[in-house]
Amino acid sequence: MTGSGTSAGAETGASTSTSTSTAFGIDVGRLLDAVRQGRRSDVPGLLAPLDAAGRKAALPELKRIRKEVRGWDWQRWRAQQNVRSALRIAGAGCITGAAAAADWIGGRDLLEWGADGDAVLGVLAHRDPVWLTEVARRLAERPAVAEDDYRLVHGLVLLTGCPAPATDGYVRGWAADMNGQHLVARLRRDPQTPVLVPRLLDMTETPDAVEWQATARSAERDSHWPAALAALAGEGLLDRAELVDACVARLLRGGRPRDLRLPLALLQLLGATEEERRARVPDWLGMVADGPSPVASHAQEVLAGLALDGALPVRELAEMSGSVLFRTEKKLVRAQLTLLTKVLRQDAGAAAELLPVVTDAFGHEDTAIQERALKLVGRHLSGVDEQVREELAGAAALLSPVHRAAAAELFGTELGDDALPYEEVLPPVPEPRPVAPPAGTVAELVEDLVTVVRRPDEPEEFERALDGLVRHARQDRAGLTAAVRAAFGDAYWMNGGDHFAYGPQGILVVLGALTGTARLSRISDGRRRGTAACGHAGPTAVVEARLWEAAWLVASEAPVPFLLAAPTAHTGAIDASVLAERLREYRDLGVEPAPVDLAQALLRVRRAGPAAREAAARAAALGTRAGERLAQWLTADVSLAPGVRFLDRGPDVRSGRWWFADRIVATYRERRAIREEFPSVFRWLSGDSAEGSDRCHHWQRERPHWPGVLPEDREALAVWLLPVVGNGAEWDARGSAWGLTALAEGEGPVGPAVHAALAVGLGSRHAEDRLTAVDALLVLASREELDAEALGRRLGSLLAEGTVKPSRLADASRTAAATGAYGTVWAVLGELLPGLLAAPKPPRGLGELLAVASECVERSGARGAVPGLAEAAARPGSSQTVAQARRLLTALEQGGDQTTS
């Protein structure tokens, strides 16, 4: 492929050599021929003999070649890269204006990751230093150029002697160039270091090259950035005070932990003198309140040292304590309570000001922390007046019910007398949201198309634009074609070439069919594709089949007025009455439905309720085969819910594990209607088994359009979403639980597949995915579709095999319970706890699960027995597992407090 592309370029150059030399002169012609043939190494030598007039004469032709090369397809990519590199060098040597030169050199289409930077620098070397300084400044302001072609920009800086441009892109490029072994020596040799290091510390996003070498595990290497900078500060090459200021300022601004790793590690290595610690008390207070855990922990250590030395006023200590005790990190909270204990031991007179702050820990989710705070208050209660005592007693209402009796004894008053009987709190049942109608004008449709091309993974916008394309292509084809060409004229798929050889690329294939850039033969080939190459790709194959069919409808100018499958609700569903009316319009126009469009419409139509029965009667009366199919579909038992089972986990030869996705077996029943009347791309819904013997790539990728394929059959949809959700638990993928919302809000039966997907989602690594799973759980509960016992059993098996980790499930359960769904959460946890308690060795995180379960029982007033709980509570010791087992056992025996405050 590469050889043929280069050869083609050479042949083109040879055939035009004589005419070029005649039109531009021999020297200019030779330069242009070298550029056309991609002989970039020859360009500097051919530029040298050209005078200003010759260079000016070559420039228009260089621009023309640049425009021509943009239209080359991927099969000539090697030749394209060579020509572009030659163009970049030649243009740099011919352009006279600094701004124009920077635009040319920094053009994204000409930038080949700095491979020709030295050649560009060579053809610029003879230019005026003032001119070069301006070019360097402009290139440094282009982030991609300054980073990817740092050595070119740095070379210009060296040529001119101008100050190092401290732009983000230039600093990233410099950091990557410095990175590696013997970092201290590299930095010491570079005169830019004193200028660029403060800017590096100030950057919002730490360069990857630096962040990788700023972690604790790389501290012993000679490529460790914090150690290198601290060493240079010790030598006096870097101003230590300036570095401390920069680190503190960056930490105060906050941000992602990865971006704060460098300034924090450097600040710790530089150390802080007593004077610096005292002078920066407001800064430490800001960090301890709002910083990520590592930053807050460092600030807490500094302030704790000041407090124990008597250098931190009680008022600032109270402010610090209020900030820390409000945080969720148990380690920070425990450390703060320990500090307060030591300070009150030294100065009992501070109790009146500090004890009210201690009560902030009464509402902490960890009852052990609540207990520590209550004991601390009790030890110093005698040192406060009645007013403070009443304030402390009022705060005791925040305590968990397990500590209410101790608090009542301490303060001499009953707590919770005004509490109301417990009532489960669940979210309102979500109502289907109507989808906006298709665009009414061509201009409005083009706006939709631009949005969909930029955001192809928004199902509602996609469906609206697809239907609008089919409608307006029939109503005003010429006007729509002109508008699309104007809006997407510079797009790669508009410049010729076979861009759809490997798939429709979303809605682009329909736009290509409209404008003629997608060949009709390619579209016909796409339509003829049968079942998916892999059974796991079934839903994706349906979406692609719809796109190929829509492209064919547009390209062939078929008289279809609109798409039958355009959804009426945000879930992707279609009201049965609407679909019956659409079929009536088709009949009146004498139009036959497109096969894939009709099949998708049937899968989306709502089949429940009186409206479906009425629509069936109307459809049957149409007298068309499409109407008969709709009537039969609405009245027959066509549930697509498969049988689902999970193979036992066994050893994988490569990794010692058998991943969750590999163990899902879904068996679909034989469905004659689908096998005989649906296009072949839907055959996976009728009798095929999706058994994961190999980890194909379809299991790995997120497909936001899948829910719209099966909005009325949640169990079938859940089978295809299960591996995606599983990636979030086993492979730590982010955003993997997105499909759970569709499962919760969709229609159709809820069975083992939906509950399995929900169970795995609750064990996702990332908190945002667990929150999505919690929302789905609560919606299913509010719709009275949640089988809590079945969910608990599935979670129990996933916990036992290690797919779900107890700590992650505890976090999700705690979040769900905090919304007021204590009874629902307990129903789930009560089912899975016996298996965990029976394990020979208590799994890590069991104590957290028991704590959540205890809170649920105490709040909801549940009673009963949990097998194995009494034995766990009877074990010696005071570990969290034992303590929470005792707490849960007591709550179950007493029936909780059955109140809500």
Image (cartoon, rainbow, N blue to C red):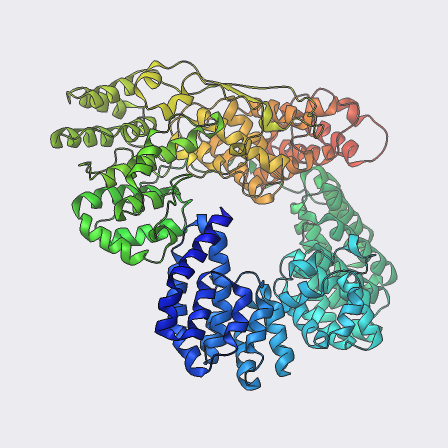
Q: Is residue 173 visible?
A: yes
Residue nearer the viewer, 597 or 614? 597
Does 591 sit above or below residue 515? above
Q: Position of residue 740 (x, y in %)?
A: 49, 35
Q: Is residue 170 visible?
A: no
Residue nearer the viewer, 145 or 456? 145
In the picture, measured across the screen, residue 214 lies left or right of residue 311, that is left
User: Given the current orientation, which residue lies at the most extreme front position?
Assistant: 18
In the picture, measured across the screen, residue 144 lies left or right of residue 838, that is left
Residue 591, by quadrant, is top left
Q: Quadrant of the C terminus?
A: top right
Residue 518, by quadrant, is top left
Q: Position of residue 134 (x, y in %)?
A: 53, 81
In the picture, measured across the screen, residue 77 lies left or right of residue 113, that is left
Residue depicted at x 37% and y 15%: 671
Q: Position of residue 634 (x, y in %)?
A: 28, 20
Does 574 sit above or below residue 297? above
Residue depicted at x 65% and y 78%: 158
Residue nearer the viewer, 200 or 100? 100
Q: Position of residue 688 (x, y in %)?
A: 45, 18
Residue depicted at x 81% and y 25%: 874
Residue depicted at x 53% and y 83%: 131
